[in-house]
Image (spheres, coloured by chain):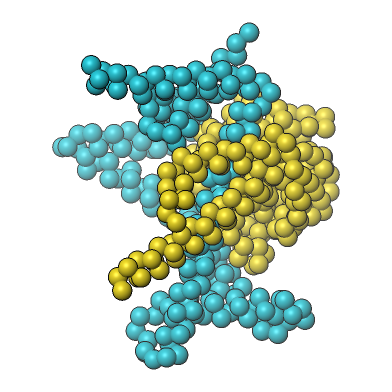
Chain colours: A yellow, B cyan
Amino acid sequence: MSKYVIWKDHRWVYLLLIVVVSWPLLSPIGLPVPVTPSTKMAFDTVEKLPPGSLVAMSSILSGGNWPDLGPPEVAFVQHLFKKKLKIVFIGEVDETPTITETTLLPRINKYGAQYGVDYVNLGYIAGAPDVAEAAFATSLRKVISVDYVTKKPLDDLPIMKGVNTLADFKLAIHIGMAEDPVRQFYTPFKIPLLVGVYGMMGPHYIPYLDTGQLSGMIVGLRGAAEYEYLVGFVGEGLQGADALSMTHLLVAVFVVLGNVYYLYQTRDRTRKEK
Amino acid sequence: MIDFAILSSVFLTLCVYSFVYKESMFWRFAEQTFIGLAMGYTFVLAVQQIQTVAWIPLSAGKNYLFIIPLILGFMLYARFSKKYAWISRWPMAVLIGLGTGIAMRTVIEAQIIQQISATFLPLVAPNPMRTFNNITIVVMVFCTLYFFTFTGGTGKVPDAVRKLGRYTLMLTFGAAFGATVLTRMTLFIGRFTYLWGTNQRPYLLAIGAMMLVVLAVYEKIPALFKKK
């Protein structure tokens, strides 16, 4: 049997992976995208907010994690603009404010929103995750004096009038991990908290949904595809959904084949020993 | 007109992915370029951050208290001297103490009390699926916790409970590992989607073809010299 095992050379696996990823991107299959309860909860939480409500959007977005965290943030921000909500962006990684300006916002339909009035980028806060979040939540004016884009004092920006702590916001959204915003945003202020997390962290954070500490969650690219479907636009999530489903299928097939081969080898070895 | 931003991003991406074939000069070039760029970029951002947050308010006479973190920051560099390395322990102690203190003030409620109370579930719910889920959660939490009681008795029942706890842990680790592998796939899909974009495609095909030729020739050169 071992002579048939071509994937002993890992390069065949990579080649197969490239074929499986490229095929649905070149010719979309249109596999169904069922919406998971955590994504629906996130969507409903945003839908319930009245227009003009202030939303804090903290993020650890960077070039390296864009494929997994970028699409969830794009989906959230697109929905917030569509609902005419006011957004305050903060970055917990030094790259985040730049990525927000150069990569995130240019691909969003802002529905006529004005900088400084409907949204603002407050830049990077050092000390992530807990220290930066606690500083922003309890005394944001002590750590941020001017905004990132226009370098204007916060009092000169209409959106920041009378905003001093997280208690002045109606919703907090965090892109990254979920433990630290639960500790620094939800627990002291008890405002609804949504997160967009790495695909690998999704299973870990389900208990936070059960306790009500999270009001909703988008899990990686897959969750972004579901959210885009709910909001009604096609972004990177829906574009990559077919490729993601196909690679999941490929990995599942490899797991089964690997186990079959392992069992065969074990049985073969036992037979030889006898 | 050549777009150098796209050209460099496509070239460096292909350089990194050349590693899946084998380690080559392309991979080493991308690796060293990335480290150099990342260090330079981080350094500039750090200087900008110090300037905006601390130096400007300090020099404008708005807040003299910022002198304290600046001094603590400079004390960290004492690590480079063997004689004065002990000085760097003070800012390190402040950093660790501050971080732990801020995280700990809500960790008891957020990650212990709330999580424990979420496992106090009714074993009979109106919905049969919910009933099954609740029973599963309660049994698995109990068995997993019992797995870590090393002073308990032995026997058929305690061993069976521990075994169920072990299976629960294995299921959790399996789910985490599976999700991790699939996240890596997401990163690859993201990169591939970018490379196959309308603007990037000509660069991908041209650079990809050139790299394949160079790799093929590069591999043949040592063989040619060996023959001679």
Quarter occupied by the C terminus of chain A: bottom left
Q: How many marks?
A: 0
Specify whether residue A141 is in view.
no
Residue B226 picture quarter: top left
Q: Describe residue A242's horizontal placement relative to residue A62 as left or right.
A: right
Specify whether residue A241 is in view.
yes
Quarter occupied by the N terminus of chain A: bottom left
**Front-most of residues A268 and B94:** A268
Q: Describe residue A250's horizontal placement relative to residue A12 as left or right.
A: right
Residue A111 picture quarter: top right
> Residue visible at 77% across and 38% down?
A234
> Residue visible at 32% across and 19% down?
B221
Q: Residue furthest left?
A: B83
Residue B55 picture quarter: top left
**Front-most of residues A147 and B184:** B184
**Image x and y of residue B67, in percent:** 40, 34
**Image x and y of residue A146, in percent:** 60, 30
Above or below residue A69? Residue B209 is: above
**Front-most of residues B228 and B85:** B228
Above or below residue B39? Residue B125 is: below
